[in-house]
Every structure is written in structure tokens, then in C-alpha cells.
């Protein structure tokens, strides 16, 4: 299934670079530009600056961890100086920063052959790329080789924008999603410019508007095409700037990395097709989570209570202890999905994490356990409610039971159990796998926070 709402929320809350970081980057670009324009060593050489790469294409994404920086490429076009070698332009830019009290401790050229990096105290840096315009077009500097290298960032940006228009605007979001898979799921190691170009090349002029009806459909189309393209190329293809064929993007790629990328895209393609084609809502969410991780599924904003306020855990002395010997040789994991039932129609709202946002009363929770324990085995569940509301209503529970449906009849699948929210408080559910009279897998407590507006 498509789960368009979940895709939109996932991009907004998890993948996209947040507003504060976008504003920080924009401010940094303006500040560096002003500095180069007025600096004693660069003001007479200044022509213009222009953002490049993922920032310009709007395919930049949130860093996968708090301690990882994001970067912005800023091309600095300089006037040609007679008698200068290519490396002299790079040195002049680096010297301008090094002679500044403001930047002398932030400048970094170690291992940088094409840029001068300014490391800010926040979680981002700007790579300033010196360039000059010759009769052969715009050239960036490779200081290690003391050579000019052709580039056409403006042409590339225009090409990508045109491809994005053909894909109804979804190309930008697809590149972000594939980069997210690369960065957080550690599926492959491919530079952003390669991913962006490969995917852009697979948007065709002959594509109809209906081909890009929505984001998940567009993702399926382009991942399918990417897999087909890679499987058809045994030898690593040369990927170039579509607007400047002499500019190759393969310098960080080799046959071994290409073979791994091809293999992993083939796996990704199967997973995307499985998730898209699965007609069961919760099964489909699980398939998408295999691709993007547990953060893919979350409740819709309009159905959520105030952000993530956990409820205090009450007395749990009524919880029964497991009656089986424990020999936890395997794992079992619980996933939880939220439904409401206005009238007689079930409405799926997405998934929740343990100890997540508060839920109102009269919602339904579908718990699905996953395990690799081989059959035969039996499954037992335990719900432990806590708090004064459950005490007063006689709903503490704490016993072990077989999986059930919303109707309270036994579930045909012992790994799927339904519950409903009722009592204000923090409660938990746990799943146990029993084999030959021994508990061989235990999920651990999955906490749920409930607020019933009719009960304080």
C-alpha cells in the first residue's frame, strides 16, 4: 500500500533538514560571501558566489546522528590573475580565512584538494570551492594536481530542476529518501552526486503525468528503473554531468563499490515492490519499515496529544511472574499499530513506539509479534495496567493469556493481539514464546500512555 500520509510525515519529521538548520546554512552562506567580497586578499578577485550540490538541488537531508555534521558547497568564482598557477587560487582563499581572527581557528584544508572548509561550532560546515572562468568555461581547482577541472554547477542545477518538473516534483523527495536509506540503514556507500544523477537520468521525457501520481508510486518507478539499469551493466558505467560530459562523477567509485551498490539496490527494489503491493495495512507498514526503519510509522498530527509526555508508572505488584523456566535463546519483537472505529468503519492511523505519545481512550491497538523461533511453539501475552483509574475500575489485569481479536474472540494468529485504550495511566504489554515448556523468547515491556478525558 502507498501510505501517502505516512510518507509525507516521515519526510517532514525525520528526513528533511529542519528549519533551524536551513536558516543556519543560509546565514552562513551570506556571511562567507560578504567576507570574501570585503577581505583584503579576495575583494579584488571576487566575481560571485553560488551554492552548489545538495543544498542547491534541495536534496539535502538531516544528518543521521546528532554528532554528524551536514555540509554546504559554495562555489567562489574568482578573477583570473596573470601568471598564477591553479593552486595559487586555492592558497589565496585559504590565506584569506587564516589571516582572519574570526575564521583562523575554523579553516581546514587538510586532505582538501578542491575546497577550503570552514567548520562552524554548530553541526555544519561550508566547503568553499575556488573557481575561475576561462575560454573553456568554468573551472574549479585541484590543488594536489595543480590543475583546472571543468565544471558546470549551474547547468547541472537547471538539468535537475527540469527532471524534477517532469517527475511532478517528486524527484527531489525520492533523492532525499534514497540518501536517507544510504545514511541511516547503511545499505551502500555512494556519493550524493552519483545517486542524484543516476535517479535523474531515469526520469524520461516520454513519462506521462500519471506515472508520477504520488510519492510512493514515483519511488517505486525510479527504484525499479535503477535496478534494471544497474543489472544491465556488469561493468561500472561512467556517470557524467549531463550538461558537461567531460566532467565525470566516478572519482569516488570503483568496480567493487559498484558491485555492492548493484546488489543492494536489487534487494531494495524487491522490498519496495513488496511494501507497495502489500494490501494489508499493517503488513505494508512493516514492509516499509524494513526499508526506512521504525520511524517511518507514526500517528497523524491531528490525532496526537501534546508532544511525547510520558505518564508515571503506577504500582505493578499485581503482575504475575512468568511461570515457565526462562532460557532466552531467541528474540521476539512487538510492533504496535493504532486504529479508530468511527461508526462501523476501521481507520488506520499508523504505528507507535513504546512509551510514546499519549493516546486517548477508545482507540484500538493491534500488536504484532515477530520471532524466528521455529514451530511448534505457543504464544502468551501479558497486559499490566497501572494507576488509580484501572484500580477503581477493576482493570489492572496482569495474567497471561492467548491472543485475541477486538471482539475478544481468540485470534487465529497467536502472534497478533488486539487491545483498546481505556484507563488513564502507563501500562505495558509483553509477549512470551514458549517451546517445550520453556520460555525461549521474551519481548520486554512495550509501554503505552493513555489519557482518558473523563478521568483525571
Image: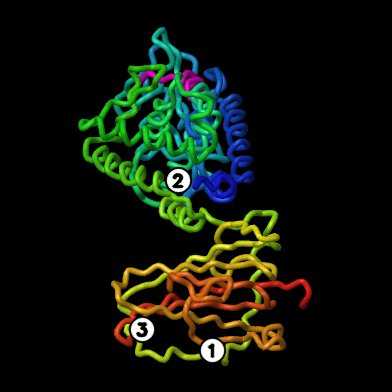
Q: Is residue 383 visible?
A: yes
Q: How would you rate the neighbour count of disc 3 (Cα within 10 Å): few for under 14, some for 14-19, many for 20 or more?
A: many
Asked which quadrant contains residue 311, the reply is bottom right
Q: Which residue is mark 2?
A: 276
Q: CA distance from mark 2 to mark 3?
A: 36 Å
- Taking depth in this image into account, of 414 and 195 the one nearest to the observer is 414
Q: How would you rate the neighbour count of disc 1 (Cα within 10 Å): few for under 14, some for 14-19, many for 20 or more?
A: some
User: Which label is found at residue 319?
Assistant: 1
- Taking depth in this image into account, of 371 and 255 the one nearest to the observer is 371
Classify residue 366 as left or right of residue 328.
Answer: right
Q: Give the vertical position of 391 relative to 118 (above or below).
A: below
Residue lying at 34% horizontally and 23% vertically, measured from the top left? 240
- Taking depth in this image into account, of 178 and 395 the one nearest to the observer is 395
Q: Give the vertical position of 101 relative to 207 (above or below).
A: below
Asked which quadrant contains residue 353, the reply is bottom right
Instruction: Name which of mark 2 and mark 1 comes first in the sequence.
Output: 2
Q: Is residue 96 visible?
A: no
Residues rendered magenta in the picture: 149-160
* Label 1 residue SS: loop
Q: CA distance from mark 2 to mark 1?
A: 41 Å
- Tell me if residue 253 is in the magenta stretch: no
User: Which label is found at residue 296?
Assistant: none
Instruction: Name which of mark 2 and mark 3 comes first in the sequence.
Output: 2
Q: Which residue is mark 3?
A: 439
Residue lying at 44% horizontally and 16% vertically, measured from the top left? 138
Residue lying at 69% horizontally and 77% vertically, measured from the top left? 424
Amino acid at each position: 500500500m502507498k501510505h501517502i500520509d505516512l510518507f509525507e510525515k516521515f519526510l517532514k519529521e525525520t528526513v528533511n533538514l529542519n528549519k533551524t538548520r536551513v536558516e543556519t546554512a543560509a546565514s552562513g552562506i551570506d556571511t562567507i560571501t560578504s567576507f570574501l567580497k570585503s577581505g583584503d586578499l579576495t575583494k579584488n578577485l571576487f566575481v560571485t558566489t553560488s551554492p552548489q550540490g545538495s543544498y542547491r538541488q534541495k536534496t539535502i537531508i538531516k544528518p543521521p546522528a546528532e554528532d554528524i555534521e551536514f555540509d554546504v558547497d559554495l562555489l567562489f568564482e574568482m578573477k583570473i590573475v596573470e601568471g598564477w598557477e591553479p593552486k595559487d587560487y586555492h592558497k589565496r582563499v585559504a590565506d584569506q580565512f587564516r589571516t582572519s581572527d574570526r575564521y583562523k581557528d575554523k579553516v581546514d584544508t587538510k586532505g582538501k584538494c578542491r575546497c577550503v572548509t570552514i567548520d562552524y561550532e554548530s553541526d555544519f560546515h561550508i566547503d568553499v570551492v575556488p573557481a575561475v572562468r576561462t575560454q573553456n568555461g568554468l573551472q574549479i581547482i585541484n590543488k594536489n594536481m595543480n590543475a583546472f577541472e571543468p565544471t558546470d554547477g549551474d547547468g547541472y542545477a537547471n538539468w535537475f530542476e527540469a527532471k524534477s518538473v517532469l517527475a511532478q516534483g517528486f524527484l527531489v523527495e525520492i533523492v532525499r529518501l534514497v540518501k536517507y536509506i544510504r545514511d541511516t540503514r547503511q545499505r551502500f556507500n555512494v556519493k550524493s552526486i552519483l545517486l542524484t544523477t543516476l535517479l535523474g537520468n531515469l526520469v524520461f521525457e516520454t513519462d506521462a503525468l500519471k506515472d508520477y501520481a504520488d510519492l510512493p508510486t514515483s519511488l517505486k518507478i525510479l527504484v525499479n528503473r535503477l535496478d534494471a539499469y544497474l543489472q544491465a551493466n556488469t561493468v561500472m558505467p561512467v556517470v557524467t554531468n549531463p550538461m558537461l560530459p567531460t566532467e565525470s562523477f566516478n572519482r569516488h567509485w570503483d568496480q567493487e563499490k559498484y558491485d555492492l551498490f548493484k546488489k543492494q539496490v536489487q534487494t531494495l527494489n524487491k522490498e519496495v515492490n513488496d511494501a507497495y503491493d502489500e494490501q494489508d495495512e499493517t503488513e505494508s507498514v512493516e514492509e516499509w519499515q524494513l526499508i526506512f526503519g521504525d520511524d517511518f510509522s507514526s500517528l497523524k498530527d491531528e490525532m496526537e496529544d501534546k508532544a511525547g509526555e510520558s505518564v508515571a508508572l503506577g504500582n505493578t505488584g499485581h503482575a504475575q511472574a512468568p511461570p515457565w523456566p526462562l532460557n532466552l535463546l531467541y528474540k521476539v519483537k512487538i510492533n504496535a499499530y493504532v486504529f479508530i472505529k468511527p461508526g462501523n468503519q476501521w481507520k488506520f492511523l499508523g504505528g507507535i513506539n513504546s512509551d510514546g505519545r499519549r493516546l486517548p481512550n477508545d482507540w484500538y491497538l493491534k500488536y504484532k509479534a515477530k520471532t524466528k523461533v521455529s514451530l511448534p511453539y505457543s504464544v502468551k501475552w501479558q497486559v499490566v495496567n497501572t494507576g488509580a483509574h484501572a484500580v477503581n475500575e477493576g482493570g489492572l489485569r496482569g495474567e497471561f493469556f492467548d491472543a485475541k481479536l477486538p471482539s475478544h474472540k481468540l485470534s487465529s494468529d497467536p502472534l497478533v493481539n488486539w487491545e483498546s485504550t481505556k484507563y488513564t495511566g502507563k501500562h505495558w504489554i509483553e509477549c512470551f514464546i514458549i517451546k517445550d515448556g520453556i520460555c525461549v523468547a521474551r519481548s520486554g515491556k512495550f509501554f503505552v500512555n493513555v489519557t482518558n478525558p473523563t478521568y483525571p
